Image (spheres, rainbow, N blue to C red):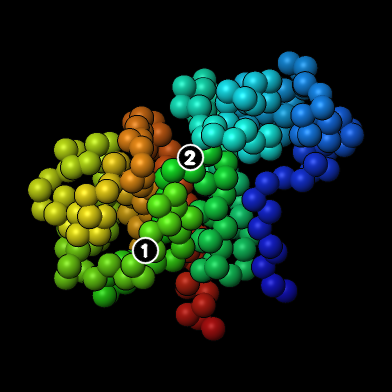
Amino acid sequence: MGEKKLKSLMTQSEIAEAANRSQSSIHYILNGDRMPSIKMALSLERATGICREAWLFPERHWNPYIPFEGLDICSICPNRHNRIMKSIEMAEAHFERAENKREAFKGVVEIYKTYTGISQARFVYREVVPEGLKLLACSEGADRQPLLELLPKDTFKQLYQFALNEQSVVIRNFPYDVNTLCAEEINMYFKMKLKSKLSIARGGLFFSMHSCAISLDWTGSGVKNAEKHVERIAKLWKEYNNLINQK
């Protein structure tokens, strides 16, 4: 049996079932014909992971189900943490269910992009191989710049060493939050366009989230949650590779 196709967003019927509401009421809300009550907004938040403010005020808070042109993300939303945790939960569930884990990375990065709402950031997974850091999957970026399939270890020595040591690197304002050698390597790749970057290496995987358009800020707890998430994905990835090698 092949891997099920990823549904980036829930359908109307899935939302209705998860929120314990009629599909017609969900239809009216998604089409902008009806404003949800506060009680309904809370139900929709629990069902989709999209915060209540985004259901009550979609013109001010990012909501992928009711998109407004020109609205990217509400960084000060008090429930932003819940939305990000929902994306992590969905990504792990998708990866765990997938039969082909290598292909599943594509779904994982698209879930990140869809449910965090940070369209100006790019989510990337690479595999640590003897030659360097090999691309597994990446979300579409606002800059649409193609990514290198392989970051050779002889060229990107600092990044490769970070990966081998299973380190995390938080760069909130490039090039100020990183050492000179690492900054030079990153510059070779981004050519002075990078604004901020988070990299987490665990269990043979190298995850990164970067933006060339905006400066992103990560809290200490946010980085810790991301690290735990990458560790869980890495564990599943290792188990999958062990099974493949035994066949």
- Residue that protrudes farthest toward the left in the picture: 180
Q: Is residue 238 above or below residue 71?
A: below
Assign a secondary structure to mark 1.
loop
Q: Is residue 26 visible?
A: no
Q: What's the residue type where badge 1 is placed?
A: Leu
Q: Are marks 1 and 2 in contact (CB under 8 Å)?
A: no
Q: What's the residue type where badge 2 is placed?
A: Ile
Residue 232 at what x, y percent from top left?
47, 52
Residue at 53% x, 39% y is 117
Residue 154 at what x, y percent from top left?
16, 70
Dot 1: within a 10 Å radius of its alpha carbon, few (fewer than 14), some, or many (20 or more) residues?
some
Q: Nearer the viewer, residue 216 or 69?
A: 69
User: Which numbered disc covers residue 118?
Assistant: 2
Q: Quadrant of residue 226?
A: top left
Residue at 61% x, 51% y is 93
Quadrant containing the C terminus is: bottom right
Q: Is residue 56 visible?
A: yes
Residue at 61% x, 55% y is 94
| Residue 170 located left or right of residue 4 | left
Q: Quadrant of residue 191?
A: bottom left
Residue at 32% x, 49% y is 199
Q: Which residue is mark 1?
A: 147
Residue 123 at what x, y percent from top left?
43, 51
Q: CA distance from mark 1 to mark 2?
A: 19 Å
Quadrant containing the N terminus is: bottom right
- Residue that protrudes farthest toward the front in the picture: 69
| Residue 23 located left or right of residue 44 | right
Q: Earlier in the sequence, mark 1 or mark 2?
A: 2
Q: Nearer the viewer, residue 165 or 8?
A: 8
Q: How many marks?
A: 2
Residue 181 at what x, y percent from top left?
11, 53
